[in-house]
Image: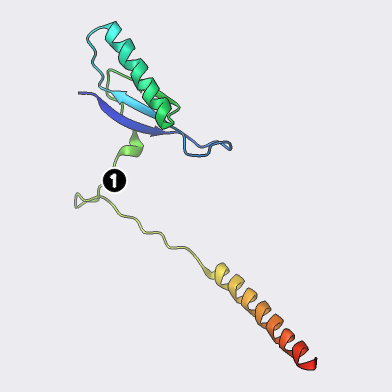
Amino acid sequence: MARIQILELPEGADDASPPFIIVVDEWEYESFEDHGLLAARWDAFGQKVGARGVLFAECTIDIPADEISLGPDGYPIKLRFEGDFQQLREQVRDEVTQIQAGVANALRTSRKV
């Protein structure tokens, strides 16, 4: 039975969304006429959903990005990333200090009037 996969392509500067190709592998067809008709329909579908193209293959094509990494316990590996927010904290602190100084200056100016 045929499989359908998505192969993501590198993004270019002009790409509004990530480019991709639809990969249909383990493809079996009865005759060349059947292959041409179905290929035309898949190509039309690919254009409709925004694919750069549709790739057909009788063999199995393994796309490594579609694999799920498993840990020693057999469950998918989950990664957690934590950002370093020290620079952000310093920027926010500087902005708050500037705003406070501006408010204090505005209050002093308004009391003189």
Q: Which residue is mark 1?
A: 69
Figure quadrant of the C terminus: bottom right
Q: Residue at x 60, y 76 (%)?
A: 93
Q: Residue at x 32, y 38 (%)?
A: 66
Q: Quadrant of residue 42?
A: top left
Mark 1 residue element: loop
Chosen colour scheme: rainbow
Q: Quadrant of residue 55?
A: top left
Q: Position of residue 14 (x, y in %)?
A: 58, 36
Position of 28 with respect to 36 (left or right) is: left
Position of 91 with respect to 21 (left or right) is: right
Q: Residue at x 43, y 63 (%)?
A: 82
Position of 101 with respect to 28 (left or right) is: right
Q: Position of residue 49 (x, y in %)?
A: 40, 31
Q: Position of residue 35 (x, y in %)?
A: 30, 12
Q: Given the image, on which type of amino acid does mark 1 rest?
A: Ser
* Crowd band around label 1 with a 10 angstrom C-alpha radius: few (<14), some (14–19), many (20+): few
Figure quadrant of the N terminus: top left
User: Residue 101, relative to residue 41: is it above or below?
Assistant: below
Residue 21 versus residue 60: which sits nearer the camera?
Answer: 21
Position of 68 with respect to 96 (left or right) is: left
Q: Position of residue 48 (x, y in %)?
A: 41, 28
Q: Residue furthest front?
A: 113
Residue 61 versus residue 50: which sits nearer the camera?
Answer: 50
Q: Residue at x 26, y 19 (%)?
A: 27
User: Residue 113, relative to residue 74: is it above or below?
Assistant: below
User: Residue 71, relative to residue 57: is it above or below?
Assistant: below
